[in-house]
Image (spheres, coloured by chain):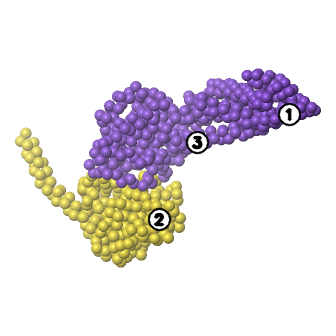
Chain colours: A purple, B yellow
Amino acid sequence: MFTLKVAFRNISRQKKRSFLLAGAIAFGMLVITIINALTGGLVENIRENFAHALGGHVFITGREFNERGQQITKIRPDERLDQLLTEHAHRIQAFTKRSQALPSLIFGSKQTMHLVYGVDFQEEDKLLKSLVVTEGSLEKALSVENAVILPLPAAERLGVEVGETILIRLETLTGQHNVGELLVVAFVEDQEQFGLSAAYVSRAYLNSLLGLEPDEYQMLNLFLTDLAFVEGFTRAFREGLASPGEEPEEEEPQVTVSVGGMPLDPAATRQRLAPWEGTRYRVLNINQIMEPVELAVGVLNRVGLVIFLILLLVTMVGITNTFRMILIERTKEIGTMRAFGMHRRQVQSIFLWEAVLLGLVGCAAGLALAGLIILAVGSWPLKADPSLQFFLNQGRITFRLSGESVVLNMVLVVLTSLIAAYWPARAAAKLSPMKALSSNF
Amino acid sequence: MRRICLLLAAAVLLVVAAAPVQADHLEQIRAILEKVDAQSRFSGTDFSAVLTLIVEDPEAGIEKLVVRQFRRDDGERYLLLIQEPVTQRGQGYLLEGDNLWFYDPSSRQFAHTSLKEAFQDSDVRNADFGSSSYASSYEVEGYFEGTLGSFPVYIIDLKAVDDTVPFPYARIWVTKDTNLVLKAEEYSLTRRLMRSALFPKYAKVGEAVIPVQMIFIDELVEGKKTQVSLGEISTAKIPDHVFTKAYIERVNR
């Protein structure tokens, strides 16, 4: 306790120097805290926006074999599914029923393959709210049977304008060719780089092209009350919907252009499956789909960590140099303390406590500053680029910081400060009282 | 009242009498379809040729593909080896019954593909490299007589027998005297014209009569079409090992 008091007094004695040292530490802490909080917020916003675009947090698809041995994707009324939905009703906020296809969209001499979701626009008001419209209006999607909401990149590839009609070429569930006409009612922003780019049409119309009844669907998407339940919920549904004798798939389907459960890669190698009776389900969740996003964010976090470590290294050199200067300045003082009976270990402790205190003060200041900046930036609505909206929560940047990362960063800062101060502290402890008292410093 | 009754009776008699006649005619058309299919098959012999495809795509431009084809209809086999362009040389398609494999020499891997798929982004489908199967895949919806150019033809409307046939509806123009398909139109489930095919030139090869010039027009994408011409045609016996994956791998070494 005595050494701590002396350390505190020493820091207070040299206010300017302590301020600069703690300031350097605070800056490092500020940078890493803001990067961590920003990426945390981005991931949460993207996850939430993805969930609205995909129509849920958990995605259930059903597969069955028809009388000709063809595998088709379709969900029929099923007691097991109903029972599971009832059992977990308290954790389900809402659900959507969708169809999907990967057709060619054609306009004049141009064509592009694009993921198309068949949605019930009346039910999916959350989807309509989450879409960032760049041209046209989503209102028409509610009234026009063959309306299509196109992602902007797809519209640009086709060279189509709002109000024009495009063709949709696809295969029915049994593999027959089919063609329909779609009226473009709006363009929306999308995030192709994250594997999510979908056009939206009415489910009834897409069903008519796929050979499904208007009320049938291929995917049941569930919004949960809390994202923390996602993994457990997915596991419960996987186990609950597994058919007797059904073996778990060897590996999870790769998420490439597919979103929400069905492999859409046309180049995929065919998997030989023995036909089964009834429906088999595949249950995926938002976390699996978010993998590419989280990988990108992980890179950002790592870059942040590298910057933080460089800052710490620079600070460490600064602390070491400063403590060496302190050692020279206090040589006589150390000699006096040693002559009065202070042990070597106590001298070393004073130096180390000073480093710890500087580290803690720096951390606290960095966190406080980061908090102020987060508050200021978080309350500032952004109206710049519409494509940024996908990363935002209702037009605002949001920050999420986990307690673990704060504690980890603080431990790292304090540890670095201790390491930086260790050698000067050891040198101070080794000083002979006689020599120290007779020194000219 | 009596007049109305007489008219009704006459109408009923007409329908009853016309039905067998119509059925006879449809039977006759079905027989024509069987002949069309039969003469497109190489029964008992093998077939090989070099196919030149000129693919016109409004976005990608004009591309020339040269493909060597080996075909054995007994067992529904064929092998297609791409010779040109150089960037795609060595790629191959091997059909064994219902299984169609695509080989890519750059990855040295076989991937399963489908007869319904377009061949190398052209307007030719992988199924077009085999014999036709109108009689087994379609039932006759109706027909009428007409001319195509100077040829008297039956214009036959076809409907797929079940939902596994890729094109649910088709219309073909078949010459009356030689049973050759001069033109074919394929329609979607919504009865929209998707592809037209023209067969202006035929050649007798062994027992079969096959088109040696074909034009496939994508009716949905403006300006997209593919012309196919056959050369170096042969009916010489092809060794069995040609129709194997090992052979494709070997020719790429």
Residue B98 x %, y %: 33, 60
Q: Amino acid at mark 2?
A: Gln
Task: Say what secondary structure mark 1 lies in.
Answer: loop
Q: Which residue bears the numbered disc 3? A: A296
Task: Using the image, name the chain to which the residue with label 1 belongs.
Answer: A
* Of labels 3 and 2, the one closer to you: 3
Same subunit: marks 1 and 3: yes
Visible residue check, residue B60: yes
* Of labels 1 and 2, the one closer to you: 1
Q: How many neighbours does mark 3 have within 10 angstroms: few (below 14), some (14-19), or many (20 or more)?
A: some
Visible residue check, residue A331: no
Identify the disc placed on residue A432: 1
Residue found at x 52% / y 41%:
A291
Residue A58 x %, y %: 43, 36
Q: How many neighbours does mark 1 have within 10 angstroms: few (below 14), some (14-19), or many (20 or more)?
A: some
Identify the disc placed on residue A225: none
In-front residue for pair B33/A361: A361
In-front residue for pair A16/A203: A16
Q: Amino acid at mark 3?
A: Ala
Residue B94 x %, y %: 39, 65
Q: Is residue B96 left or right of residue A298?
A: left
Q: Say which label, 1 or 3, has the lower sequence index.
A: 3
Task: Say what secondary structure mark 2 lies in.
Answer: loop
Q: Which residue bears the numbered disc 2? A: B91
Residue A272 x %, y %: 36, 54
Quadrant of res A342 = top right
Residue found at x 25% / y 63%:
B33
| Above or below, A129 relative to A190 | above
Quadrant of res A408 = top right
Contact between marks 3 and 2 (CB within 8 A): the answer is no
